[in-house]
Image (cartoon, helix red, strand yellow):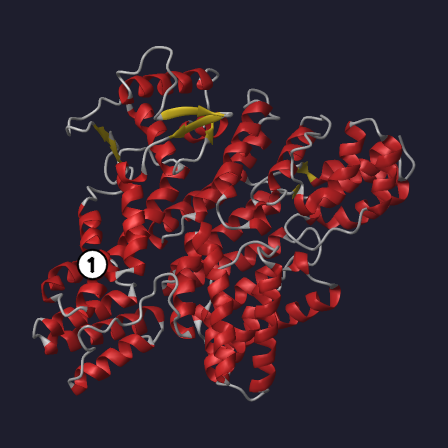
Amino acid sequence: MRIDVLGAVRALRDDGSPVDLGGPRHREVLARLVAAEGRMVTTDTLVDDLWNDPPARALGALRTFVAALRRALEPDRPPREPPRVLVTEGPGYALRLPREDVDVHRFQDTLARARRDPEAVTDLGAALAAWRGPAYADVPASAWARRERTRLEELRLEGVELRARILLDSGEGADLVAALGAHVAEHPWREPAWGLLARALHRAGRQADALATLRRARAMLVDQLGLDPGADLQRLETDLLSGSAPPEGVRTAWTGPGVRLGPRTTVELARTLALAGGDALVHSRRDRLAAVQAAERTGDLSLTARIIGAYDVPALWSRADDPEQSRAVVAAAERTLTALGPDGPADLSARLLATIAVESRSADLSGTELERARQAARRAEALARDLADPALLAFALNGVFLQSFTRPGLAAVRDVIGAEILDLATRHGLPNFAVLGRLVRLQSASALGDLDAATSHAEAAEQLAATAEAPLVPVLTRWFRARATAARSTEPGGPTAATAAAHYRAAEDALRTAGMPGLHRGLFPLALLGLRLLHDRPAPTDPRLDWGPYRPWARPLLLLAQDRAEEARTALAAVPEPPRDHMQEALWCLTARAAVRLGERGAAARAAAALRDARAEHAGAASGMLTLGPVARYLVEAEACAAGAG
């Protein structure tokens, strides 16, 4: 038995004859289990992945699909003998096949082997040739399938370039010109590919064409990205001009795992990978810090400043995914800024200041640190405006946005920032910042309760993400749609609260592997709590829920839901002021609700004072991902309690 997913999903018997897998849903179940690489996938996850709005009999339908697949994959299995291929495991199912019998696993293993051993280049060529089209080509565009297609396409491109590099390093590769030319035309931003094409042209005796290729690469990078070619391309051009191309039989540096790179190449690769999410995002942050540290060790201030400022990856969330790494980057930026002095190059100073503002996420800072970060944001913006550099200004405004959570009720201010980022990005061809602008405006419209405008921004962000290769965007917009469903669940004839909860669950599953723990932790329980508050129900008390950083504010309501009023009163007295971040309105509203329930006038008064400027907003909705309902509802209750009414 063999299963192929690099193209349309199919199964083949040992003699090569096709297996009738059934309809599209049957193939999607099989594909989803292939993507899990032998791990168990729960039935809840499978249901959420198969249906945006699961029908009442979804679980029964899933079991029917699994039973049919088992008959197709093991037609000769005796009736009472347990399945060996598609097995039941715990609360879900898993696919049990040797990795060499699944084309995508075979491809990944071959690529990993070729990274370590150039002798595997023939096997790599065969594995690349086995691709019949986009991965999971006939699976609907569900979130899991989009993530997998994006990840595997990146690996395929890496494989194409690795194979070419190995062949060129071994003295072959003159016949790669056509394939690499098509590869560069389709993926012009992949700088290493231009170098490979130039080397292949040189190997074919076409030195003039090789030099022309490198000049085209330089023009494209400078004109469209504002970047000079990296050191590898510059070195190759020098070698070709001097007649000393890279010698045969000597492997040049490869950007695969396990190989040491210079700081410039490392940070440029990290910048590209950061937009992919998941493990790529995690590795991107790690490699970015390594590049900064390597640059500092050179003692070259200009290089260090450029390496720190080159990672202008748009950032949306006010809580860092890795606070320790962020603090290390901020410290390096501050050291470099001090060393450059007040007369240092304005563009470098602006990038360093913008980096400090972006990396100093408000939820993780003390009051003094927050003020320093806000000053950095203002100075970066001013310098960028003086320099009339749109890309730099967009980056600086990203820092201004992240430092705009000084108090509740500033959604309209953030919308203005988002509108300017979007305008700059649209007029000057900055697709990643255009996505950021749309998401900032989505959050602002969500906070102001304008779901129509927020939906429009969500759809526009998704369209941009498809061309900007930003797979995290649909993960975020899925949360927004769950938030909208929750809001509509209170309307006559709207969806049920159970449907809204299911949408939040599906969004949570998609976010779990996105590589953004600063966003992920505690979000799902907070969303469920908000849904229950919308329907005047007690807080969810499932002990398995991970409340993450939001536990202190949720705890009084959790205790009240368990009829532990005195403990709730003690917990309320210990609740700190919320951090100045996306969730501050929501956390103040939780404090207000607990204070009202317990008759604690002092706590109610503090919450009311904090929430007055946010009267027109919706609690938690500044995130664009959940809602507790209108702030005004909590504010009126808190004011009445503080006044001793009721």
Left or right position of 563 against 182: right
Q: Is residue 525 above or below residue 326?
A: above
Left or right position of 495 against 59: right
Left or right position of 193 against 540: left
Residue at the extreme top of the image, as rendered:
79
Q: Callout 1: helix, strand or loop?
A: helix
Q: Position of residue 34 (x, y in %)?
A: 35, 35
Tell me which corner region of the image, top left, top right, bottom left or bottom right, holds residue 640. Answer: top right
The residue nearer to you, when weighing 231 against 116, is: 116
The residue shown at (32%, 17%) is 68
Count the numbered circles shown: 1
The residue nearer to you, when weighing 89 against 443, is: 89
The residue nearer to you, when weighing 424 against 555, is: 555
Q: Residues within 10 Å of mark 1 (few under 14, many from 20)?
A: some
Q: Position of residue 85 (x, y in %)?
A: 34, 26
Left or right position of 598 against 136: right
Q: Position of residue 531 (x, y in %)?
A: 64, 31
The residue shown at (78%, 42%) is 591
Residue at the extreme bottom of the image, as rendered:
343
Tell me the residue that label 1 is attached to: 183
Tell me which corner region of the image, top left, top right, bottom left or bottom right, holds residue 251. Answer: bottom left
Q: Amino acid at mark 1?
A: His
Q: Is residue 275 above or below residue 596?
A: below
Where, quadrant-wise, is the N terminus in this rendering?
A: top left
Q: Is residue 176 above or below residue 149?
A: below
